[in-house]
Image (cartoon, rainbow, N blue to C red):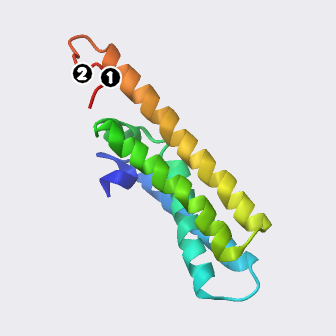
Amino acid sequence: MKEAFGENPTRLQILLTLAVASVCAAFVLASQGGFNWQLVIVSVLAFDIGAGIISNSAVSTRTYWASLPKWSVAAFAAVHIAEIPVIFWLIGDSEISRALACALLAKISVFLIGQAECRATRLEQPGNDDYGIG
């Protein structure tokens, strides 16, 4: 759970993250005509995307990820970028798939900006000899 909320998330962070994620998943489910396994998978991805946009902007999540090695940040971005073609493969080219792709890019961008800011702040602290490596 630390990957989703960080070390010490606030109650508001948890509630907003879960609420936005649930609305995103429900919107995907309600927007498609019918119900199938592809839609279930895309709804789970929509939940993850919605949760990530909110959670990745929170200080507790940003600082937790900034404490991890840089390769984990790259892996996070790579895995989430790989979700874009999966979404299009599962439900085709539609307004929903395009909206999810844009939201996913926003999630990744918020994450990467947060990491850059946290790591730069950590390097500026007196006595820190990390040099951004690790």
Query: From where the camera sits, is residue 12 visible?
Result: no
Please indicate whether residue 28 sits to the left or right of residue 78 in the image: right
Image quarter in which the N terminus is found = bottom left
Q: Where 13 falls versus 38 (above or below)?
A: above
Which residue is pictured at 60% across the width and 53% down the height? 104
Q: Residues within 10 Å of mark 2 (few under 14, many from 20)?
A: few
Mark drawn on residue 6: none
Please indicate whether residue 70 sits to the left or right of residue 80 in the image: left
Image quarter in which the C terminus is found = top left
Mark drawn on residue 130: 2
Q: Residue furthest right?
A: 95
* Residue 11 or residue 40, whichever sits in front: 40
Please indicate whether residue 31 sits to the left or right of residue 126 in the image: right
Residue where numbered disc 1 is placed: 122
* Residue 89 or residue 76, whichever sits in front: 89
Q: Tag 1 or tag 2, which sits nearer the N-term?
A: 1
Which residue is pictured at 60% across the width and 70% down the height? 25
Of the two numbered discs 2 and 1 in the rendering, the one whose residue sits closer to the viewer = 2
Mark 2 → mark 1, Cα distance in angstroms: 9 Å
